Image (cartoon, grey):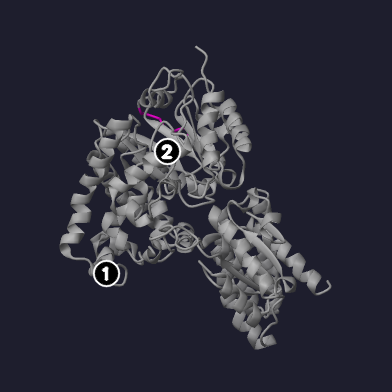
Amino acid sequence: MGKVADAMAALDKDGLLAEVKAEIDAHRDPIEIVEDARKGLEHVGSEFEKGKVFLMELMWASQIFKDAMELVGPEIKKKHGSSQAKGRILMGTVKGDIHDLGKSIVRDLLTAAGYEVVDLGVDVPPEAFVERIRSFQPQVLGLSALLTAAVSQASVTVEDLKKAGLRDKLRVIMGGGVVGEIKVSEFGVDFATNNANEGIRVIEKWIAEAKGG
Amino acid sequence: MSAAESMNSYERLELAWNLKEADRVPVAPVNCYILPWLGGINIRDMFLEPEKLIQATVKAREMLGGGDNVDPNITTLNHLGMFGRAGWDQATLDWRIWDDFPPKGNLPSLYEKQMITDYDDVLKRGFAPILYSKDVSNQLFKRSIDEFLYYEYEYPKIYADAWRRYVEKYEVPLLMGGRACHPLDMLQYYRGISTLTRDVFERPSKVMEISEWWIEYESTLAMRDAMIMGAGEVPGSEIIFFINGGPPGMSPRIFDNIFWPIAKKMIDIFVKRGFKVHCHWDNDLTPHLDTMSHMADGLPKGKIMLDLEKTDMKKAKEKLGDRVAIFGNVPSSLLVYGTPNEVDKYCKKLIDDCAPGGGYVLSTECETPWDSKPENVKAICDAAKKYGQYRR
């Protein structure tokens, strides 16, 4: 990994921003700088899955990545114009649940990884998902549910997608604290996890498959 | 007390607190919202009508198989800690929903919202400017002064009196008399977890400064409530329910340097002022058990109960079992989606791992979800009687 990736992996905000500035000043291609930072972020995610990095550190990693992107973003626009997102993901915490944290972490990490993510927020009714799927046409729908009652609500949302004829047009993933402990087949989703990084890997795989990659 | 049991619930729990074997393993699912749900009242009545809550509790406990204590729902009533009961009107609670349970309504919950924007201002002027800000507590101004004073000062006495009569009649001790939040938990609510994460990494000394300042404030509120509930007279009200174990996913460095010193100070304050501490600590704290093994340092025996959510109970028993009592932790998902047989098996393992030698209370992880199957909660109580007999 390069110096940017190393600083990112070390969760060293000051070091990361200094390296990014130095590379911008040295006229390195800003897309390469982003990719380098992503490698560092991926390393943090991988260490998180192994239990060597903790959730707050993962959140901090996504925050300092965003800080770095604020420096690099304008350089990309100058040099390459607007970049194309890798894929589209719609997310939200299901109706009856207002927990925000897990969803926000996944949203930030997916955004950092180059996806276009629309986050409908918390306590989202099924009809709001349906309406936004029609306009945004995501490849993946992410349902967040922390409360046990909200997990059942996720299946209500999936049923509404079926009624609207949208279920076959996208993959559905569910995330949340208790989600990893239940039988997901009963809830009509394609995958469920309580691990943010695992969820991201699955989403990336689905989108690559959808592109034929 | 049944014919087969030789102790009452309070005696049984007291022995567990003191790391000794009772007649059997005490069992105490933390039944909170499930009481009004099964008892047939809505959340509004749960909050505002103590007699209805008591009746609902009696009815629900029969369906759930009882248990060796009862949750008087102090945490629910005061979960906006720094604002006290006046905080019911606080903007972070969505009061559109309190006439029903999900999916029609919802449980009162805290929206993540940044209310504390300036630590230094709070350190200088306290919380009043936030509480009495129309931006934050608009609903508060729809109440009359009399109503405000009633709920802040009169209602707690009415509430406490109802529970005192309950304890006397049914001889079941209370789970707690007062509740206190760790400042890092409070900062999750009032600062937002994302901002708090940034604070912890960018200015840990400021987080420590406000946390230190917060200790006395939060501790005093908790002990005041416990006194109102009857500490020293009503069994169980001498217990401070100390929640919630900090933000999820603290690294050992954050836990050891920020969470732990504050937690230990609060535990010491409660115990040295004559209270017992029930540490209701969520998330998986297994990586921090070595640090936590110092919980009872410098304190008399029998004053700390450690109530764990996702932490490895066997490891907790191994590392701390000779110092503090352990409490927990049948998973919520099992109670909602599992079967009595699955709950029974899970409880047997918990009892096998944690009960030998005493100092263990069989319970739920965090609280019993309101939508748990009653037969699954009852299975916990049955398992304590089935597998938890201590041979004397």
On whether residue B294 falls in the magenta region, the answer is: yes
Picture quadrant where residue B339 is located: top right
Residue at the spot of label 1: B133
Residue at 26%, 36% (x, y): give it.
B164
Q: In the depicted view, which residue is nearer to us: B294 or B169?
A: B169
Q: Is residue A109 visible?
A: no
Q: Are there few (<14), some (14-19), or many (20+) residues within 10 Å of tag 2?
A: many
Q: Amino acid at mark 2?
A: Arg
Residue at the spot of label 2: B61
Residue at 54%, 33% (x, y): give it.
B316
Of badges 1 and 2, nearer the viewer stands 2
Q: Where's residue B277, x and y in %?
A: 36, 36
Q: Are there few (<14), some (14-19), or many (20+) residues within 10 Å of tag 1?
A: few
- Which quadrant holds the N terminus of chain A? bottom right
**SS under mark 1:** loop
- Examine the residues drawn in magenta and state their main secondary structure: loop
- Which quadrant holds the C terminus of chain A? bottom right
Q: Amino acid at mark 1?
A: Ser
Along the horizontal axis of the image, is B388 left or right of A39?
Answer: left
Picture quadrant where residue A134 is located: bottom right
> Which stretch appears magenta?
B293-299
On whether residue A179 falls in the magenta region, the answer is: no
* Mark sitting earlier along the chain (1/2): 2
Q: Where's residue B145, x and y in %?
A: 16, 63
Q: Where's residue A206, x and y in %?
A: 76, 67
Q: In the depicted view, which residue is nearer to us: B19 or B59?
A: B59
Q: Are marks 1 and 2 in contact (CB under 8 Å)?
A: no
Residue at 64%, 88% (x, y): give it.
A78
Write down the chain letter for disc 2: B
